[in-house]
Amino acid sequence: MVKIRLARVGSKKNPIYRVVVADSRSPRDGRNIETIGRYNPQMEPSLVEVDLDRVKHWVDSGAQTTPAVKKLIKIVEKAG
C-alpha cells in the first residue's frame, strides 16, 4: 500500500520533515516514491508547504494519508 507520510530529515534535536509518498513497507526515512512537501515545526509560525495537486493525484490513485499529514493538508488548505 502507498502512503503519504512524514520522513524526518535534519540533525539531532532539530527535526525537519518532508512530506513523501512511500510504500508502507519501507522505513520511515528510507526510499520514497516522491517528495511532495515539507514541514518545519521550529519556525514561528511553522513552515508548511504541500503540493495539493500532487496530493490529490496520489489519493485518487489509492494512496492513504497518515493522521499527521491530514492535519498539515488542512492547514495548507485553510491558508489559501
Image (cartoon, grey):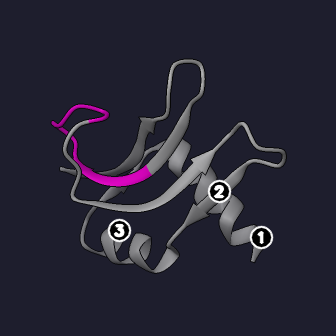
Q: Is residue 68 above or below residue 3?
A: above
The disc placed on residue 79 is 1
State the residue in front, 72 or 62. 72
* Mark 2 and mark 3: Cα distance apart in space: 19 Å
SS category of the residue bearing label 1: helix
Q: In the rendered structure, which amino acid carries the disc numbered 1?
A: Ala
Whole-percent x and y of residue 54?
40, 75
* Mark 1 and mark 2: Cα distance apart in space: 10 Å
Q: Residue at x 50, y 42 (%)?
A: 17
Task: Give yes or no for residue 26 being in the magenta stretch.
Answer: yes
Whole-percent x and y of residue 26?
17, 37
Q: Does label 3 or label 1 sit earlier along the sequence?
A: 3
Task: Give yes or no for residue 32 being in the magenta stretch.
Answer: no
- Range drawn in magenta: 19-29
Tell me whether the residue at label 2 lies in contact with that at label 3, contact meaning CB atoms closer than 8 angstroms.
no
SS category of the residue bearing label 2: strand
The disc placed on residue 59 is 3
Q: Residue at x 65, y 56 (%)?
A: 48
Q: In the rendered structure, which amino acid carries the disc numbered 2?
A: Val
Q: Residue at x 30, y 51 (%)?
A: 3
Q: In the rendered structure, which amino acid carries the disc numbered 3?
A: Val
